[in-house]
Image (cartoon, rainbow, N blue to C red):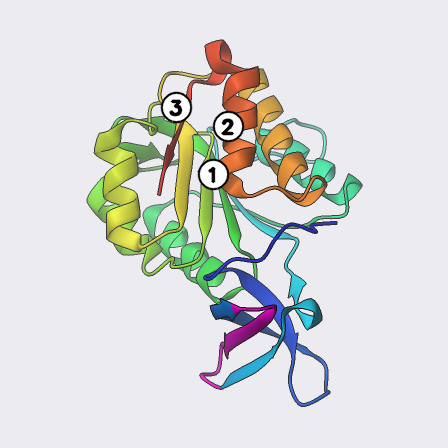
């Protein structure tokens, strides 16, 4: 389970007046005490040790053919791997830019701090099953992703024309993606390594990125924007 150090902007679960846990975001940290903002607008201050990191990963996939139980896809393999290491994947398959906007909204509202994009890509576009979505449309669909980490296995979206624009336009904490074309097997492998470092080893997204990049520099050529 994720046991890494908490940071401002992290999505967490926090108790509300000794009741059940609710989704919140850390707005301030000092001397082991956290100030948090719940999703309904309420705020509170409590010891950071009472907060629980979310182990959810929101996976949005779009490939040429819809993956079925008998077929393989990076998104499905990642879902199975996350369950194996104690994560909670939320998998969805999309075909159009309208569906992309709908599920980005679901990801924004979820307690998941991580959004994984599994689809084809170009330097300034995502390629869905039925449509291409340019960077301006992707930003509009994504909305405010403050506090979210977005890992994309989409080819070529690690170029500045996409990555920097995405972070600036959405406010995402980080955007991580390959700069060159990436083979399917390499994409599946590096995504699993990235989330293993996050959820099992308790490191930050930037440390997980550096580990994967150092280990598979020649195959993935990942870039980090944030």
Name the mark nearer the viewer: 1 or 3. 1
Earlier-in-chain disc, 3 versus 2: 3
Q: Position of residue 203 (x, y in %)?
A: 61, 41
Residue located 57% across and 25% down the image = 190
Residue 31 is one of the magenta-drawn residues: yes
Question: Could you tell me which secondary element the residue under label 2 belongs to?
Answer: helix
Q: CA distance from mark 1 to mark 3?
A: 12 Å
Closer-to-camera residue (19/99): 19
Question: Could you tell me which secondary element the residue under label 3 belongs to?
Answer: loop
Label 3 crowd bin: few (<14), some (14–19), many (20+), radius 10 Å: many
198 vs 58: above or below: above
Name the mark nearer the viewer: 3 or 2. 2
Closer-to-camera residue (26/128): 26
Residue 210 is tagged as 2
Q: Quarter holding the C terminus? A: top left
Determine whether label 3 and label 2 are within 8 Å by CB. Answer: no
Q: Which portion, as a residue range, is magenta?
A: 30-42
Label 1 crowd bin: few (<14), some (14–19), many (20+), radius 10 Å: many
The residue at which mark 1 appears reads as 151
Residue 155 is tagged as 3
Residue located 66% across and 53% down the image = 55
Residue located 48% across and 38% down the image = 206
């Amino acid at each position: 389970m994720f046991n890494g150090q908490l940071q401002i902007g992290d999505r967490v679960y926090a108790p509300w007046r000794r009741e059940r846990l609710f989704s919140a975001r850390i707005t301030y940290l000092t001397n082991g005490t956290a100030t948090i903002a719940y999703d309904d607008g309420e705020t509170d201050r409590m010891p950071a040790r009472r907060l629980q990191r979310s182990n959810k990963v929101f996976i949005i996939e779009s490939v040429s053919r819809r993956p079925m139980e008998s077929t393989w896809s990076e998104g499905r393999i990642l879902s199975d791997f996350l369950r194996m290491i104690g994560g909670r994947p939320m998998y969805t398959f999309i075909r159009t830019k309208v569906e992309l906007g709908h599920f980005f909204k679901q990801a924004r509202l979820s307690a998941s701090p991580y959004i994984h994009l599994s689809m084809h890509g170009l330097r300034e576009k995502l390629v869905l099953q039925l449509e291409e979505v340019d960077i301006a449309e992707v930003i509009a669909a994504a909305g405010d992703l403050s506090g979210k980490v977005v890992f994309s296995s989409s080819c070529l979206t690690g170029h500045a024309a996409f990555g920097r624009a995405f972070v600036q336009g959405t406010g995402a904490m980080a955007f991580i993606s390959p700069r060159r074309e990436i083979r399917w097997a390499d994409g599946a492998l590096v995504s699993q390594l990235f989330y293993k470092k996050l959820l099992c080893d308790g490191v930050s997204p930037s440390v997980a990125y550096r580990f994967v990049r150092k280990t598979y520099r020649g195959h993935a050529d990942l870039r980090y924007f944030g």
